[in-house]
Image (cartoon, grey):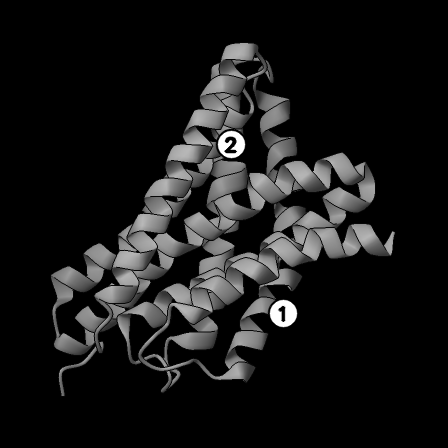
């Protein structure tokens, strides 16, 4: 059991460390990082409760074999609740923190929060379903949560810079995109993962590999182009 727990935890911690190392300008406070990971993990429980309640509502209203239910289940019940929940925690912990002074900081905060959530969720899956699930999720679900967080954090950092610059339009746009992009990516990922066929599996593998490549390229680009959120 101990081995399975570590197998569930290590991939998320590894991705946090990789992103943290790409924060070249100024490292974030250890206590802030710890709080984001911890609260991200704790958020699994209220979010799971809300997901079960909302899913029960839609199950009573819709045909669970239909396309409408599948889209609602993946984009609203799962993606919307989880990404909004992670964003809420990240914002409450970091928005007014003096350490939030570079664009890339937003990515660090989002990844720490997202990986905290993913680690806690992964432990529950791995304890219940075992080693095979741990390996599959290590290659799919954990990196996916990290990718959603990378794009959330990029726009989150941009919204901070726009607010400081007094750019209301830029702030509103970046703020919306910091939720819309991860929700769309998350929902799309879950829909493709739910395709129960050989072709569906191929599409899922291709989509995961493509998403991983794009995210890695963008992450390194964001790191190279990092700049203060204020020119003052």
Give the SS element for disc 1: helix
Mark on residue 197? none
Residue at 18% over, 81% down = 230
> Circle 1 sits on which residue?
38
Where is residue 38 shown, x and y percent of the image?
A: 63, 69
Residue at 36% over, 87% down = 98
Residue, far right: 1
Residue 64 falls left or right of residue 150:
right
Q: Is residue 9 above or below residue 27?
A: above
Q: Is residue 150 above or below residue 30?
A: above
> Is 111 in front, or is 58?
111
The C terminus: image quadrant: bottom left
Of labels 2 and 1, earlier in sequence is 1
> Circle 2 sits on which residue?
190
Residue at 78% over, 39% down = 131
Decide: few, some or many residues near mark 2? Use Cα within 10 Å; few <14, some 14-19, many ≥20: many
Quadrant housing residue 141: top right
Q: How many marks?
A: 2
> Is 70 in front, or is 220?
220
């Amino acid at each position: 059991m101990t081995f399975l727990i570590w197998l569930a935890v290590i991939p998320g911690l590894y991705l946090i460390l990789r992103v943290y190392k790409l924060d070249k300008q100024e490292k974030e406070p250890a206590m802030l990082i710890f709080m984001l990971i911890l609260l991200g993990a704790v958020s699994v429980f209220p979010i799971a409760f809300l997901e079960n309640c909302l899913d029960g509502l839609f199950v009573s209203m819709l045909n669970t074999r239909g396309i409408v239910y599948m889209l609602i289940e993946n984009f609203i019940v799962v993606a919307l609740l989880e990404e909004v929940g992670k964003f809420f925690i990240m914002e409450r912990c970091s928005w007014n923190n003096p350490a939030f002074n570079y664009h890339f900081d937003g990515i660090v905060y989002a990844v720490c929060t997202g990986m905290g959530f993913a680690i806690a969720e992964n432990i529950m899956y791995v304890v219940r379903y075992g080693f095979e699930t741990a390996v599959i999720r290590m290659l799919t679900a954990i990196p996916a949560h990290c990718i959603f967080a990378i794009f959330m954090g990029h726009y989150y950092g941009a919204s901070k810079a726009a607010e400081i610059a007094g750019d209301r339009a830029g702030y509103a746009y970046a703020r919306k995109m910091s939720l819309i992009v991860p929700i769309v990516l998350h929902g799309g990922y879950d829909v493709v993962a739910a395709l129960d066929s050989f072709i569906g599996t191929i599409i899922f593998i291709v989509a995961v590999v493509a998403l991983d490549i794009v995210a890695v390229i963008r992450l390194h680009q964001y790191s190279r182009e990092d700049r203060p959120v204020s020119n003052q």
